[in-house]
Amino acid sequence: MTDDITVAFETPEVRAKATQTSDPLDRISVRDYTKEVEIGAFQAERGTMQRIRFNVVLEVGGSEGAQTDDVDLILSYDMITEAIEEHLANERLNLLETLAERIAESILEHPLAQRIFVRIEKLDRIPGTLGVEIVRSKADDAVQVDDAGVRVNPLIVFLSNEILHGDQLAEWLDAVAAHDLPALICVEPAVEQSPVTDVSLVNRRLGLLSIEQNAWVLAAKDERCFVVGTRTELDWAMKNGQLSVWAPSKIVLDAVDKPNVGPSQPLALAQWFAKAFAADHISVLKGFEDVQSSERLQVVKTPSEL
């Protein structure tokens, strides 16, 4: 009989073997893949690079690749390393758990992938190592897709203060909610002036909080609107048809490639956000005066045009 405690501290390969079913699957693995990144929930971990190590074992279904020696018929090891690199590049994360979940979810989207073991360890926080290990099986709804199996991009809507505080707000929101695509709403900073300090980083945070203040004002005006501030929340909202209002602080501050614009340029900030979510364009609702000509901006003058 396998000792559970012993297996718990073994490598992912040993754990995979110890928990295999009566119909064992083939396995591919990436061992001791080490990267230097900024990650962590503590303030001392911000602005500091540290080494983290990945060990991944992936159980895969059968294919004819081995018999035909055709690389196109197998699940390549590169998919594991590319998933790691992609999620490290997407945004700065606080938790190893979040990183492990995202890596597992994206790899399990592959038709041949069946079960995955992901172990991630921090190498520089203590004299030894500390980390997490997860086991995940094939998910039924990893991403939102349309009937043809294509990933759905969101509708990004930029809503001005004129509309937020105007008489037509409900009519505009009706049009947004009725759109075929899942909608993410971006708003301006609050009308009230934010405090100003002598520290630019503090002013940036205060400006972002002013946008979030307006997001909550919108949510209070219409019960269909929910304020969301993380990629996980936004992904869930798009899958479930929720009308979401972007609270930008966390995504902006945790971005690996941070925007070169700030809260004082809310439309440009929304453009950066739209690019991060692969939106085709931004629908700018009437009343915003700083719209510059751009192929990615669509000015909408009436709700029926949306």
Image (cartoon, rainbow, N blue to C red):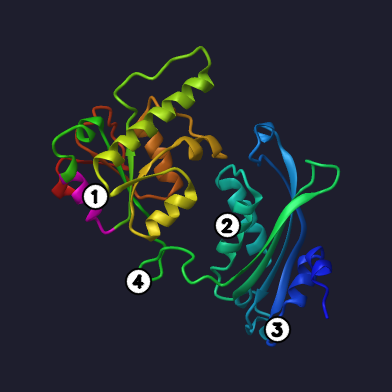
Query: Whole-percent x and y of residue 176?
Result: 24, 50
Give the Cα separation between the discs numbered 2 and 1: 29 Å
Magenta residue span: 171-180
| SS category of the residue bearing label 1 | helix
Query: Whole-percent x and y of residue 180?
Result: 26, 59
Query: Whole-percent x and y of residue 209?
Result: 42, 29
Which mark is nearer the camera, 4 or 1? 1
Specify the amino acid type for callout 3: Pro
User: Which comes sooner in the sequence, label 2 or label 1?
Assistant: 2
Q: Which residue is mark 4?
A: 147
Say few, some or many: other residues with alpha carbon within 10 Å of mark 2 (under 14 / 14 to 19 / 20 or more). Answer: some
Q: Is residue 206 above or below residue 158?
A: above
Which mark is nearer the camera, 4 or 2? 2
Q: Which residue is mark 1?
A: 176
Q: Which residue is mark 3?
A: 24
| SS category of the residue bearing label 4 | loop
Say few, some or many: other residues with alpha carbon within 10 Å of mark 1 (under 14 / 14 to 19 / 20 or more). Answer: many
Give the Cα separation between the discs numbered 1 and 3: 49 Å
Is residue 171 left or right of 27 when viewed as pictured?
left
Residue 102: numbered disc: 2
